[in-house]
Amino acid sequence: MMLRQLNFKEHFSRTYYLAYPVMLSQLGQVMVGVADSVMVGRLGAVPLAAASLANSIFFVIMMFGTGVSMAITPLVAAADGEGKPRIITRVFNHGFAINGFTGIFLFLVIVMAAPLLYHMEQPEEVVDLGIPFLGIISMSLIPLMFFQTFRQFAEGLSQTKQAMMITVFCNLINVGLNWLLIYGKWGFPEMGLNGAGWATLISRVLMLLIMWYFVWNSKRFKAYRIKFDFRKLYFPMFSKMLRLGLPTGFQFVFEVGAFSTAAIMMGWIGVNALASHQIAINLASISYMMASGLSAAATVRVGNQLGRKDIKTLREAGFTIFGMVTIFMSVFAIAFISLRNYLPLLYIDDVQVLEVTASLLVIAGLFQLSDGIQVVGLGALRGMADVKVPTIFTLIAYWVIALPLGYLLAFHWGLAERGVWYGLLIGLTITGGLLLLRFNKLSLSLMYQEKGIAKKG
């Protein structure tokens, strides 16, 4: 069967309509943290530093769980491309079991590991505030992982708008709850930083309930007979999904964990450095999470074309998305550098914190392109079920090169906060370049195989 080839405009259009709801949904996810940081920042540098420390731990664990859940999307997309609805149903059921177990396990890990923060040479007043907050937000991992099951399933079928609308709505609820619970408005108790934690937990439970209701009742998903029949769970499917999900989770751990380790290094420098890091990473996470929407689109589009065995279109789709993320992240790079003295004012009015944050935002602007290319590269390769080699790339780039170099720059060569972030810049640049080369090499190899088979035929 001859497949009609798409031109650049069609690739751009299909990717855009697939990606923009995911981008807004991801933006909604990260805006929970932004709203928390802005509203907690009004309480002072110590609560903001405590939020930074707690979130640096939580975000690593959360992203590992998110990575595990992402095994659902490429498998559903490939099965959809092949026209095999029974496999889609099987993937959903196994994903639901995996994600439920993962959410509970990660919650327990955080609860048991939280006291170790006292042994990381952080300011004691920061740890005292951070541990209770961390305990509250860690409970949100359980509903979040179940939400991810429904979301990744829907996105694998190119249904991306619903998760976006649900996420945006629940984040508005989160902001309202922040106002009530942090500051004690309308008769609610004034809970300070912990109020932000409870607001996050409540909003994520609501996200799960609404997303479940949508998938359970939508006509679009009736064909897959979604039901929780755990008697039909098989080890080979668990194994297949974990071979995709676990390396993806570790990819996120190696990258996000590098930034969290950077937060711990900032704590060694002082409270102001840690607060500055929280503001700068909070702003940089906006562009990163939106770029991850393009990454999700890359997973779906590449996985779909792989299922159809149309490698030429696979390459065109992949490189179109690399081009799109380059343009997108360039805008953020210009914004961070040109507005470096103004954006931190949204969070705090401490002069010392503002000065340090401005210097970090310049470095954040410099690594925007690398960050965008590496996250799209991971998504495109995930669509090709290539996760092991990219995981090795991230491990080496961040933990063998970026963090040791950042430590040397910060504590031995006198660059302090900026030294830590220069190390992260170098790690992101190396990762982005390697993943782009990897996608080109693998897709070319598949194309040559396809041509060889065609000639033999």
Image (cartoon, grey):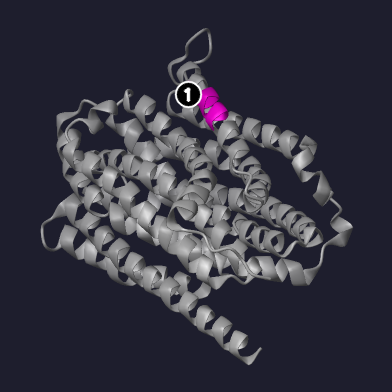
Q: Magenta part mainly helix, strand or loop?
A: helix
In the image, residue 84 sits, relative to residue 351, either above or below, namely below
Q: In what quadrant of the picture does the N terminus appear? A: bottom right
Tell me if 369 is positioned left or right of 34 in this view: left
In the image, residue 280 sits, relative to residue 260, either above or below, namely above
Tell me if 218 is positioned left or right of 356 in this view: right
Tell me what residue is drawn at x 16 percent, y 53 percent: 416
**Amino acid under disc 1:** Val
The verdict on residue 130 being magenta is no
- Furthest-left residue in view? 414
Q: Which residues are magenta?
A: 168-175
Residue 254 visible at all: no
Q: Position of residue 255 (x, y in %)?
A: 40, 59
Q: In what quadrant of the picture does the C terminus appear? A: bottom right
SS category of the residue bearing label 1 = helix
- Furthest-top residue in view? 186
> In the rendered image, which residue does mark 1 sit on?
175
The verdict on residue 173 being magenta is yes
Closer to us: 439 or 104: 439
Closer to us: 99 or 105: 99
Closer to us: 260 or 109: 260
Count of numbered badges drawn on the protein: 1
In the image, residue 377 sits, relative to residue 171, either above or below, namely below
Q: Within 10 Å of the Cα at label 1, are there few (<14), some (14-19), or many (20+) other Cα atoms?
A: many
Tell me what residue is drawn at x 41 percent, y 63 percent: 319
Q: Quadrant of residue 214?
A: top right
Q: Position of residue 64 (x, y in %)?
A: 53, 56
